[in-house]
Image (tube, rainbow, N blue to C red):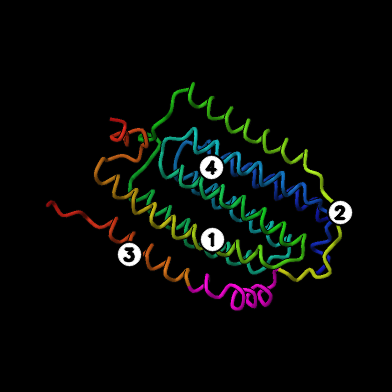
Amino acid sequence: MSELVNTSTPQNWYLLLSTLLFSIGVMGVLIRRNAIIILMCIELMLNSVNLLLVSFSAYAGNTDGQVFVFFIMVVAAAEVAVGLALLVSIYRNLGSTDIDVLSKLKG
Amino acid sequence: MTSDIVFFLLAAISVFTALMVVFSKSPIYSVMWLIACFFSIAGHYVMLNAQFLAIVHIIVYAGAIMVLMLFTVMLLNLNKESEPHKSILSKSIGIITGGMLFLVLLAAMRSTQLGPYSAPETTDVGFVQKVGMKLFTDYLLPFEMTSVLFIAAMIGSVVLAKKERNI
């Protein structure tokens, strides 16, 4: 079991992978108009950060990073619950989840 | 070298599914691709010996969050026809911005000077016992606070999603 983290995989690759996933999440937030997909892209970004924290924790031999990941998961679950409730409320009032409809504050 | 092959396989799956989340037409397909992406990330956690987090990740994300998303997509009756689309101009601007962000982060990563790496003595940092000990000793107060957060989120989502009475 201890050979699994044999550190033969350089940590730079994990850095690269989570950077790529984060950028894809940002791209999704910028180019999609459906609010549910934007919420999913935010989840993607949170997950890339989680992956980075776990890789640092595993390569440094320190458990604290994994506890942080646990708390990030807790916050993500709460965020999704509240976000989806907001979306249901918005859909009921406006009949759409298009974020460009929500421009009342523009004045 | 087996671990390298597994890493690249999982990384390819992660990136491909993440791209499909962003670029698939129907919201249902996006949710499905996101579930696949979360499973590949759980595979990364197993590769990093973080067994506790791998299991919690699958239970929380694939089990709870994705079911919630899927229910909402089906409840709101979103399909390909009602899917709003941005103009080509703002789409390409978004793609360029995301690519630029990636390049900036990559450049920042390249210019960092890493010290000599020494492998940690212990590789069991991600086991249930270690994480549990840490969670219930050093991080006991934040752990208890998460229950307050969850109650607030639960009450908030019930209040928000409840049918509004006309005042």
Identify the residue under disc 1.
A73
**Residue at x-position 67% and y-position 34%:** B104
Measured as percent of width and height from the top left, residue A55 is found at: 71, 57
Secondary structure of residue under mark 2: loop
Total number of numbered discs in the rendering: 4
Q: What residue range appears in magenta?
A: B126-144
Q: CA distance from mark 4 to mark 1?
A: 20 Å
Identify the residue under disc 3.
B155
Q: Is residue B119 visible?
A: yes
Q: Residue furthest left?
A: B167
Quarter of the image containing the C terminus of chain A? top left
Q: Which image quadrant for residue B27?
A: top left
Query: The residue under label 3 is which amino acid type?
Result: Ile
- Share a chain, discs 3 and 2? yes
State which chain disc 3 sits on.
B
State which chain disc 2 sits on.
B
B31 versus A33 height, above or below: below
Answer few, some or many: residues within 10 Å of disc 3's Cα (few below 14, many 20 plus, some between 14 and 19): few
Q: Is residue B127 magenta?
A: yes
Answer few, some or many: residues within 10 Å of disc 4's Cα (few below 14, many 20 plus, some between 14 and 19): many
Q: Are marks 3 and 4 in contact (CB under 8 Å)?
A: no
Residue B21's tag is 4
Answer few, some or many: residues within 10 Å of disc 2's Cα (few below 14, many 20 plus, some between 14 and 19): few
Measured as percent of width and height from the top left, residue B138 is found at: 62, 74
Secondary structure of residue under mark 1: helix
**Residue at x-position 48% and y-position 25%:** B90
Identify the residue under disc 2.
B1
